[in-house]
Amino acid sequence: MDILHQYIETLSENFFDPKKRVFLGYLLSAFIISFLWLTIVKKEKIKQTINKIFDKKVFMSKSSQADYILFLLNIIILMFLSPLLISQLAIAHIVFEYLHSQTILMPLNIETNNLWIIPTFFTLCYFIFDDFTKYITHALMHKVPVLWEIHKTHHSARTLTPLTIFRTHPIEGVIFVVRSAFTQGIVISTFYYVYGGNITFVTILGANLFSFWFHLFGSNLRHSHIKLNYWNWLEKILISPAQHQIHHSIKKEHHNKNFGVAFALWDSMFGSLHLSKSNEYIEFGISTKKHKYENNIIYLYISPFIGIYKLFSNYVSSQNINNKKQNLKFNKQTRY
């Protein structure tokens, strides 16, 4: 019963905790934004807009149904795995001890009557560094073949809904939990060392101030069929929903583009930025050829291991071929 209670509590937190991506308040704001976008900007009729937002072909597709099941199952899996992973407290302790052993970065004695300056700066720095580590991790998930086999589960989605964010393999979930622990541990311990113990996050309803506004202004539209794009200049700073939808496109020119979560600055810096076009058609998935089992839950769990095994087998085969060529070349040289 304790496990069942913990599962129900963890499940409900996703919708009732403002620190979570699919908090009901953020889903409501995504609906309002998409409604205003379609009726005012795209000049669509209200009935047409409602039907488009709640399109049954999207929310009841086989791809979306697989998202819902993975969402429910991954909660159970990560409930058992998370306690085994390194914590932010352990990371913070290691970093804090290191900072005390070095002499380059020293504590600052800052006195200010404005109690908001340091907490706001701390909250902003954490949000920026957290977003940067998400970018790096996400880019590696695409660029490193073994990690791509794991991340493929997410990109196999043919339709996007807010719950597609949870269409991930548990190993990817573990990777991002560890990333979060390192990010929090590094930032918190560094600020604690430099500014002393009087640091705290600035929050709204318990959520990081900047994360709150990011989610409130349509983060859930990134995984959706509502194509909301920004002005070109703004898409060079912030990732629009349309830009993330491009990231899920099957087109080759869209591959390995727009890894950013909140900021597009990282994509601009590392050459992976792709601006959206208002009338561009985007088809989601990995390829135009549909896999027979792409929405089969068992296959989605085992396919990364199959892919990694194939990578390893191909590597061993290529090494054997290279060794045979080297031996053949050596034999010819010694013969003459």
Image (cartoon, helix red, strand yellow):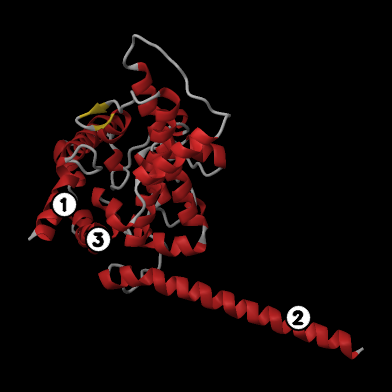
Q: Position of residue 123 (x, y in %)?
A: 35, 28
* Mark 2 residue type: Gln
Residue 118 can be seen in this image:
yes
The kind of secondary structure element at disc 3 is: helix
Residue 258 in the image: above or below residue 128: below
Q: Which residue is mark 2?
A: 326
Residue lying farthest to the right in this orientation:
336
Q: Which mark is residue 279?
A: none
* Mark 3 residue type: Phe
Q: Which mark is residue 11?
A: 1
Sequence order check, earlier mark of 1 and 2: 1
Residue 130, quarter of picture:
top left
Q: Which of 16/30 is in front?
A: 16
Residue 231 can be seen in this image:
no
Distance from disc 3 to disc 1, alpha carbons, whole Å, reads 14 Å
Q: Which mark is residue 80?
A: 3
